[in-house]
Image: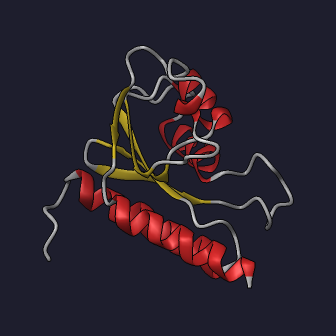
Amino acid sequence: MDIPVFSDAYFMKEALKEAEKAFETDEVPVGAVIVSNNMVIARAHNLTETLNDATAHAEMQAFTSASGYLGGKYLADCTMYVTLEPCTMCAGAAYWTRISKIVWGAADEKLGFTLTHKNLLHPKTEIITGIMEDECASLLREFFRGKRK
């Protein structure tokens, strides 16, 4: 199936590529990309095991990379595509970046920020959920199924 260029599905597919990189290195398979003017300016995946750093989530890595690319701490007019709903830490960081939009694939029914902190994001941040949800959730299920064996 062809995915229209510059659609939410197109950019989520890019985030899924990052999640697959995490999977291949035995990291929880979450990937993120940040887009500005229809161009990916940051790509990241979980690095918590690799860096031995509990804060090295895909979103945090992407925020740092995008801020470096833009030369400033604010990500206004940017969209983050992430394969899993951000946790409270990542949503808090998103607030401080003032990112314009967050699009995620799979909901995180255990640690997602919307469970307890629905108003954690900046009031101007738009949220879109469920983009390529099945594909995003499937990769996570496969990862954790392998861990339980």
Residue at (55, 37) in percent of width and height: 67
Residue 43 x %, y %: 50, 58
Instruction: Kindly identify the residue that appears in the image at 19 percent across and 53 percent down.
Output: 7
Q: Position of residue 37 (x, y in %)?
A: 26, 41
Instruction: Tell me what residue is drawn at x 37 percent, y 39 percent.
Output: 79
Left or right: residue 126 compared with residue 50: left
**Number of numbered tags placed on the structure image:** 0
Residue positioned most to the top: 123
Q: Is residue 94 left or right of residue 137?
A: right
139 lies above or below 104: below
26 up-or-down from 40: above or below = below
Asked if residue 149 is positioned above or below residue 58 in the image, the reply reads: below
In the rendered image, residue 129, in percent from the top left (x then y), is placed at 35, 43
For the C terminus, give its image quadrant: bottom right
Residue in front for this viewpoint, 134 or 89: 134
Residue furthest to the right in view is 52
- Seen at 55% across and 71% down, the residue is 141
Q: Residue furthest bottom?
A: 149
Query: Colour mode?
Result: secondary structure
- Residue 24 is drawn in which quadrant? bottom right
Please indicate whether residue 87 sits to the left or right of residue 20 in the image.
right
The spot of residue 78 in percent (x, y) is: 37, 35
Quick one: 76 or 69, which is closer to the camera?
Answer: 76
Residue 17 is drawn in which quadrant? Answer: bottom left
**29 or 117: nearer the viewer:** 117
Viewer-nearest residue: 56 or 131: 131
Give the position of the N terminus as an image quadrant. bottom left
